[in-house]
Amino acid sequence: MSSMTPQEIVSELDRHIVGQRDAKRAVAIALRNRWRRQQVDEKLRFEITPKNILMIGPTGVGKTEIARRLARLADAPFIKVEATKFTEVGYVGKDVDAIIRDLADIAVKQTRESEMKKVRVRAEDAAEERILDILIPTARSVESTDEHHPATPQIEGPARQSFRKKLREHQLDDKEIEIDVADVRTQLEIMGPPGMEEMTEQLRGMFSQVGAPKRKTRKLKISEAMKLLIEEEAGKLVNEEEIKTRAIFNAEQNGIVFIDEIDKVTSRSEGGGAEVSRQGVQRDLLPLVEGTTVSTKYGPIKTDHILFIASGAFHLSRPSDLIPELQGRFPIRVELQSLSVQDFEAILTQTHASLVKQYQALLATEKVTLEFSPDGLTRLAHIAFDVNERTENIGARRLSTVMERLLDEVSFDATKLEGQTVVIDAAYVDGRLQELSKNEDLSRYIL
Ligand SMILES: Nc1ncnc2c1ncn2[C@@H]1O[C@H](COP(=O)(O)OP(=O)(O)OP(=O)(O)O)[C@@H](O)[C@H]1O
């Protein structure tokens, strides 16, 4: 669990997201509150539930990005869903539980990755030994194939030593060897009814034991073999049961569920069938937010302490149009601002992995230096802003489309420009984009 202070969280978010101070503060407090809760005496701890957040603001201004970055900072399992997905035809009530089941999958994957990382060095050592055993068959590899009782390691002979050195210096990477690895089994897919995940999982377990995992000999380059063997050895070193238990804990205590387009499932006064369906989605979401238990294939997950962040533009409706119970469960309201030309400029240049840095790095691989002059960047930001104003406002997403168009020619001709510096100044930007941006019809298609 992250023990970062709210100030630290905000300054970390500042590296990626421009502006939106209120939203950053709100999520920072929410994250810190989780840490605080863990410090509270156990009896009281279970009474303290998260204060969920409602983010209000137009599209493409950083709502999802803030939540996603927060989750990454906290190493928290994170899932984004669109509330409108549950109003679709064919939607069967209670399917919202699938959100939590997906969150559980993400948590397990994340926990496994982090456990695998911890045993990586040991797995690398073991994989190296296995490759050496193949290169120089020794008494150990011939006599004992039982992994639980390996023969006493041999004293390292000069041949083994020399191969080990070459292996580590990557001199043998392209040499082909035959290795014996677990066959990726075509797993029998057993689909159980929703809500019966545990039973389905038991069935899967029973069937998987019918045939012992098969092994298969494969001929591969040493570099490839090494990767496979490291994976396999790491898999042996981690404990699957422990991963499940930790992942469930992590989903329950640290999970973040981001529900987008919540404004589109508000009840408006016109009534009718769609209205019923929208209200239905809110009613279905309610138990998750209030705290319920969802059964997943890894075991039951309690949703009481999961942090929910809902978001929407609320152009046509207001938060007060949500059903009252749901309003009460999202007590923290933050508004996100539309982005200005200056914000666009900052997003282009100052963020950690800004578009400018990304394109520079991409073209550097072709030995082309991309240089943006300050007036070029200002021009670019202006054009993105204008196109948003005149066509549809898609927020910072506009920067990606405009930038792609701007650099289309350089990207295509990069191989011919090797060793050169391309300067993107206001004149270059105008030359590539001015006509387009003035023509509304063309803008709609291209920018
Ligand atoms: N304030 C910002 N600073 C930096 N980048 C931003 C900002 N706002 C948006 N972006 C970038 O624009 C893209 C879209 O933003 P994001 O996904 O957060 O939109 P959103 O506000 O959640 O909108 P929607 O509700 O439509 O999903 C992301 O790639 C994000 O990095």
Image: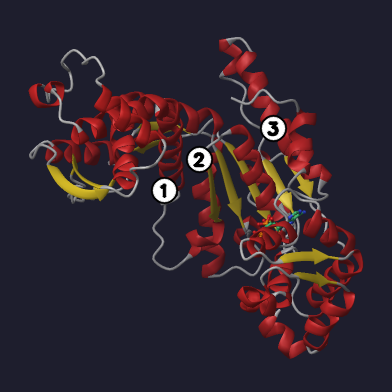
Residue at which label 2 appears = 287
What is the secondary structure assignment of the residue under circle 3? helix
* 92 to the left or right of 6: left
Q: What's under tag 3, amino acid-wise?
A: Ala
Mark-to-mark CA distance, 2 and 1: 13 Å
Q: Of tags 2 and 3, which is closer to the observer?
A: 3
Question: Which scheme is used to colour this image of the protein?
Answer: secondary structure
- In front here: 85 or 118? 118
Check contact, mark 1 vs mark 3: CB within 8 A: no
Q: What's under tag 1, amino acid-wise?
A: Ala
Disc number at residue 132?
Answer: none
Disc number at residue 98?
Answer: 1
Residue at which label 3 appears = 30
What is the secondary structure assignment of the residue under circle 1? helix
**Quick one: which residue is furthest to the front in this view?**
158
| Residue that appears at 68% across and 80% down | 409
Q: Is residue 179 among the parts visible in the rendering?
A: yes
Q: Is residue 195 among the parts visible in the rendering?
A: no
What is the secondary structure assignment of the residue under circle 2? helix
At which x and y percent is residue 141?
A: 14, 26
At which x and y percent is residue 200?
A: 23, 41
* 313 to the left or right of 231: right
Q: Quadrant of residue 370?
A: bottom right
Q: Earlier in the sequence, mark 2 or mark 1?
A: 1
Q: Is residue 218 above or below residue 245?
A: below
What is the tally of numbered marks visible in this picture?
A: 3
- In front here: 440 or 349? 349
* 156 to the left or right of 141: right
Q: Earlier in the sequence, mark 2 or mark 3?
A: 3
Ligand 1, image quadrant it occupies: bottom right
